[in-house]
Image (cartoon, rainbow, N blue to C red):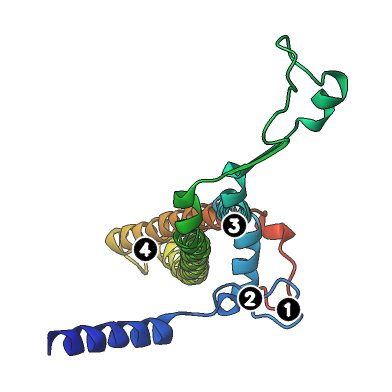
Amino acid sequence: MRKTFLFLLILAALTAQAQMTVPLPTIVAPLDSPAVAFEDYLVQLAWINSHDGHIALQEVLNAEDRAKNTKLEWLRDIQATFNLNEANLKFKKTDSTGTDNVFFPRYNFGLNFSPYNILSQKNKNNISKRDIKIAEEKVQSKQRATRAETLTRYAYFKMTNTVLLARRQVEQETKSAFVLVEQLYRTDEKTFEDYAAASSNYYQAQEARIRAENDVLQARIALEEVIGLFWDQVVHPGKQ
């Protein structure tokens, strides 16, 4: 019963993992994709210019090269020796006692190897395969993080631009209202309190617009940091 439960638990975990695993191209669109959405294009730029991404890709290559070396590791401890005593017999047939000087055996062949390395080679190969898988999973993790960070910064950048447009509209409206009240105040058709209120609203709108412009600037700098390009250098049909 317990073994059946464990088997079902492992099977459920593997099924969930298969359903949750996202293919690599859907995380970062293929770099040669001609028709890619602007958001995906920004993710491409971020991944291309990501130092952490480059390191993760190099770690995959390192794991693959180590796996190749591991497959041949069992050959390192195999040593073969061969001695030929026939040559000595040609120069000296007898020893000091007058008897034939014969070396047995005339040919010596030896082979040394480590049974442990041979028997453990399969496990070493499996470890190497898991190391490659781990390195590939790290790449996907970096890609997901890059995608999330890029889209988050771009969304904030768009929001700050939208807010700036609204702030400019409010500033224009409050300015028109202030100019009108100012003219009416000069003809005594508005009180000083009306003039002061309109003036305060106008300057508050100016301050809000200036703050909104600063938010846009900071959001653009943050986005440029992750994509590795100045915003003016980004060329794409979907750019707004």
Q: Is mark 1 on a helix, strand or loop?
A: loop
- Pointer 1 residue: 33
Circles 3 and 2 in contact, beta carbons < 8 Å: no
- Out of 94 and 55, give the one closest to the viewer: 94
Circles 2 and 1 in contact, beta carbons < 8 Å: yes
Q: Residue at x 41, y 87 (%)?
A: 19
Q: Which residue is drawn at 53% across and 64% down?
A: 136
Say above or below: 201 vs 13: above
- Pointer 4 residue: 198
How packed mark 1 is, by other alpha carbons closer than 10 Å (few <14, some 14-19, many 20 or more), is few
- Across and down, in percent, residue 100 comes to 75, 23
Tell me the kind of residue under disc 4. Ala
Mark 3–mark 2 Cα distance, whole angstroms, equals 34 Å
Tell me the kind of residue under disc 1. Ser
Say above or below: 226 vs 189: above
In the image: residue 99, left or right of residue 172:
right
Mark 1–mark 3 Cα distance, whole angstroms, equals 37 Å
